Amino acid sequence: MNESSWGAPPGAGQWGPPEYGPASSLRGVAPSASAGPVHDWGEAAQTRPMPIVPEPGGHQDDDREHRHIRDNRDHPDDRGAAPRSGPLFRDDQPQEPMPTSVPGSDRSPDSEKPKKKSAGRNLRAAIGVGAGLGAVILASLFVYKPVFIGVIAIAVVVGLWELTSRLAERKDIRVPLVPLAVGGTAMVVAGYVRGAEGAWVAMALTALAVLVWRMTEAPENYLRDVTAGVFAAFYVPFLATFVALMLAADDGPQRVLTFLLLTVVSDTGAYAVGWRFGKHKLAPRISPGKTREGLVGALLFAMVAGALCMEFLIKHGAWWQGLLLGLAVAASATLGDLGESMIKRDLGIKDMGTLLPGHGGIMDRLDSLLPTAPIVWLLFVVFVGAG
């Protein structure tokens, strides 16, 4: 009997194992000799008891177009059974499932949509802490000047503690904290009492104290540790001394308030505009969150605030001076923020501390204030005198 009457194409013997025998024996009945070729390939495939599986290594693509026997997965009794060696036909490829929600699960097609832009920090905690700090600063600034000097000294000591702790944890740099804390406090007080000359003398003595203090330990890494100590003395207390220099003027509280307001407004403008409109990164390798649009916002906000402050807060000040002051503050605050971001990226940390919820540590608040203080002090001296 001709095998083609069962749907096997010419040369089909090479596709099936020889022990299956003639196709007619698979059904267990002898077909009639007068029966014509069977063309109902689906019926032939469904009545076979076993799937015809290609021999390993066979040429599966030679007679694919002439082969009409279905895979055993199309059999009503074998649906859901996995093929033995992957798809048998060209169009028998697995289809990617449609995104559907799973009962009892929170995942749905809507969950794959881009999430709404987040502010990136706890704004409620940040606003609460900021309001508390502002109240302390205003009360000490306008009630009794020496109290504000104490606030500056406390901020300097805590900032030095955070910086030296992170250096020891991340880089194993042992910076002596005691001479830095004592010398930093002396710098702030000397700047308020004796002016810039007193601040410079206190800075030199603090650096010398760091060198001597470190001599009491092993000489290994001495140069590295004292270099970091001198850097810390300059970066935190010496730059903070310029706030004390501003406070020493007759209208010192107004100058310090202007300095603080412009720095805060600059940071706020950069944050608000950058979060809402920021698309172009400012310095992606240093601080990926900062954008050029945010810098524009900082400049605009600070210049407007500077014009208002110089016109209404500073005696003999002019609005155009405020524009220049705001421009300088926005630039220096941004550079200061990037500078500390560079330090934190080198140390492999996100924040310098956790003392202030929503802000990080003290150093995370002083980063833009410290490099801005000498610039604002200098511009005040140029515009309206030392006072």
Image: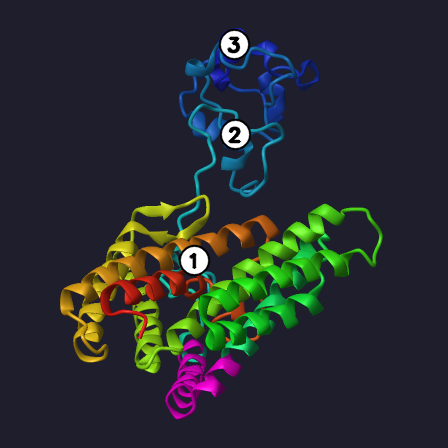
Q: Residue 380 appears in which quarter of the rendering? A: bottom left
Q: Residue 352 appears in which quarter of the rendering? A: bottom right
The answer to whether residue 230 is above or below residue 17 is: below
Return the mark for residue 20: none
Q: For the C terminus, which image quadrant?
A: bottom left
Nearer-N-terminus badge (1/3): 3
Q: Residue 46, image x and y in percent?
A: 51, 33
Marker count (numbered)? 3
- Secondary structure mostly seen in magenta is helix
Q: Residue 377 appears in which quarter of the rendering? A: bottom left
How far apart marks 1 and 3 lie (CA) works out to: 87 Å
Q: Is residue 199 left or right of residue 311?
A: right
Q: Residue 81, image x and y in percent?
A: 59, 40
Q: Which residues are magenta?
A: 126-151
Of tags 3 and 2, the one toward the viewer is: 2
Give yes or no for residue 128 being in the magenta stretch. Answer: yes
Q: Is residue 262 left or right of residue 185?
A: left
In the image shown, does 327 or 240 lie closer to the viewer?
A: 240
Which residue corresponds to mark 3?
Answer: 2
The amino acid on which the numbered mark 1 sits, given as a three-letter code, is: Asp
Which residue corresponds to mark 2?
Answer: 71
Residue at 61%, 27% (x, y): give it. 85
Which residue corresponds to mark 1?
Answer: 337
Quick one: SS at disc 2? Answer: loop
How far apart marks 2 and 1 lie (CA) works out to: 66 Å
How far apart marks 3 and 2 lie (CA) works out to: 23 Å
